[in-house]
Amino acid sequence: MDTAGAGEHPAAVEQVVEAMDLDAAHELLSAAYGRMRLSAGEQRSTLRMASRTVGSVRFDQLGGHLGLEVDSEPMGTYLFGYLASGRTWYNSGDGDRFYSAGDAFLTALPDRPYTAGAEDPQASMVVFSQAAVDEVAENVRFDGFRPVSPHAAAAWRSTCEHLENELLPVFEGNSLVVANAARLLVATTLATFPNTTFAGTTAADRRDAHPRALRRAIAFIEDNAARDITAADIARAARVSIRATQLAFRRHLDTTPMAYLRRVRISCAHADLCARDGSVTTIAARWGYARPSAFAAHYRAAYGVSPSQTLRSG
């Protein structure tokens, strides 16, 4: 799925579908994950799928009684999973990868066909595109299927559960919170599963990290702080690469583009608090903070007092 442009993340879309036989289960999986051909299976099958799409991320809950094997065309997206019970396996030309209860995994690379099988799975799946990754990290591709460590896998699973079950149902109408949550999930996934980062800062990046690019970036941030903007959006406005933009901020301001954006949003929140334009929680959410505690920490670091103190004295 493609990400929406700056400030254009759609509202959450929820869907629950049940399939009561093998053919219906096959059609459901094909619609969700790309064209696939059934190669084997049990006719007496049931499958239930609940999906929630928020911004650039989709959460799927799969469960049922079935056993099947499929051959699938490339999905075009990343599909990560956590298996609560049952068994599943995948092969994208590099040998069978078997997963059982408690395992987290990447199913296959977006551009690779694969074969797969499942037996009575109860699984949580997370789907996002390479475009969603590009908003967080430049020139990064996932290239491994298992988490780098059990600790990383546990942190990833906890993040998925928190976003899907606690944060997004409450803040799904807030585009800044939704966008920040999606990028947190992508960043956590990058920290969990093996990936490759291509060559670092180039000579062209160093040349482009000049004050003119910085001024263009700053103007864009200050004009669009209330919108959902990414590092890629800022770089496009600066007319240089993401790495050159990051280098310009580091070289001239000793900060990063996203940290500067947070500073501007905190300043805007300060103005709202002084004007008593809502509660602390409302103002925090308005400027992209789902957790008032995180907002309070950033605000205190910037102004030396708590948001509630400013609100009371405003």
Image (cartoon, rainbow, N blue to C red):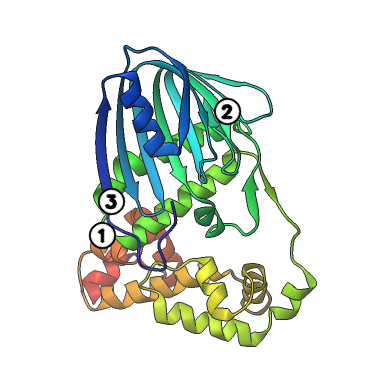
Q: Quadrant of residue 49?
A: top left
Q: Earlier in the sequence, mark 3 or mark 1?
A: 3
* Residue drawn where x is 41% and y is 53% of the image: 56
Distance Cα–Cα, label 3 vs label 1 = 21 Å
Foreground pick, 22 / 185: 22
Q: Position of residue 145 (x, y in %)?
A: 61, 33
Q: Earlier in the sequence, mark 2 or mark 1?
A: 2
* Residue drawn where x is 33% and y is 72% of the image: 269
Identify the mark at residue 281; answer none if there is no mark. Answer: 1
Residue type at the position of mark 3: Ala
The correct choice, above or below, for 31 with respect to 47 in the image is: below
Q: Position of residue 260 (x, y in %)?
A: 51, 72
Distance Cα–Cα, label 3 vs label 2 = 31 Å
Foreground pick, 255 / 227: 227
Circle 3 SS class = loop
Question: Crowding at label 2, few (<14), some or many (≥20) Cα neighbours within 10 Å?
Answer: few
